[in-house]
Image: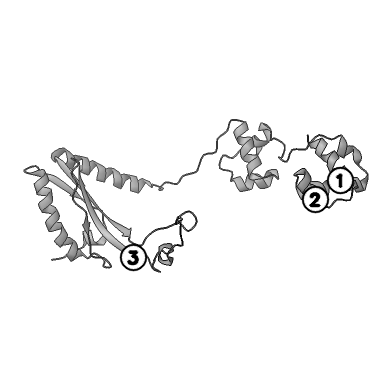
Amino acid sequence: MFVVKQTCMSTLIDADLLTKQICKLEGVARRTVTKVRSLMRKGDYGRIHNDARRSGRAPAMTGHELCNVFANPRMLMTVAVRALGCSTATVSRGVKCHGSIFYRIRNRPMLTDTTKNKRLVCVTRLLAQKCRSDIFFYSDEKNWDVDPAFNRQNDRFVSFSEPDLDDLMVLTTKYLAKVMMLGIVASTGDTMSPYWFPRGTRATSAEYMDVLADVILWMHRVTGDCSFIFQQDGVSIHTAKID
């Protein structure tokens, strides 16, 4: 089919049609017409009429080439593309064709022997406490953005009439406004209603102690006469020593 198009293009070129007109008539790219013109100037009519269509894709890669390049499994794709002299799509296609899979490299904290020993001591102590206790309470704070979120590219406003200008605007601040929330969940599945700290303020140790007074009352209502353990992280408002 492409050979027929090449023949038609050469005929139209002989008829002195412009490249733009040929592209529109034959539905081909401008680069293709330019290439045929170049071959005609060189007198290489055999390639125009007899050659099969050349695929736009690069030739498939062999498994041997891939194994040589990816001998190191952590070889970066950019480095492999540069070494093979082809595109990223060609390398990805070659890897898939030979049954290989790209895995995303993930990170994890590097634990030294000292850190491992500390964690082992903490876990052992925690398990020992759990054997003597019936209920655990876990707490944590979270900062929430209160500014409206929107995606400039994907969020759209649909209107069947002339929209109001205010409907097309999302009001934001230079520095995102945040509010802190305290959440507590028990090992039995009970959850305390979220406590929201005053907006625009940072929680202090004194304020946290006032909140804990209400939290302890709620924990006693949940546990009744059972013993319990309240667990929290080591942020400054939790570990501060105040009278």
Residue hosting label 1: 12
Q: Residue 161 at x, y = what percent?
A: 46, 59
Q: CA distance from mark 2 to mark 1?
A: 9 Å
Amino acid beneath label 3: Ala
Which one is nearer the viewer's eye here, 185 or 199? Answer: 199
Residue 56 is situated, as x and y percent measured from the top left of the image, at 73, 41
Q: Tell me if residue 109 comes above or below residue 203 in the rendering.
A: above
- Depth check, mark 3 against mark 2: the one in front is 2
Residue type at numbered disc 2: Gln
Could you say which is closer to the camera, residue 98 or residue 31? 31
The amino acid type, in three-letter code, at marker 1 is Leu
Q: Given the current orientation, which residue lies at the most extreme right position?
A: 43
Per the image, the residue denoted by label 3 is 177
Residue 46 image offset from top left, x and y in percent: 90, 37
**Circles 2 and 1: CB atoms closer than 8 Å:** yes
Spatial CA distance of label 1 from label 3 is: 66 Å
Closer-to-camera residue (27/88) = 27
The reply to whether dot 3 and dot 2 touch (C-beta < 8 Å) is no
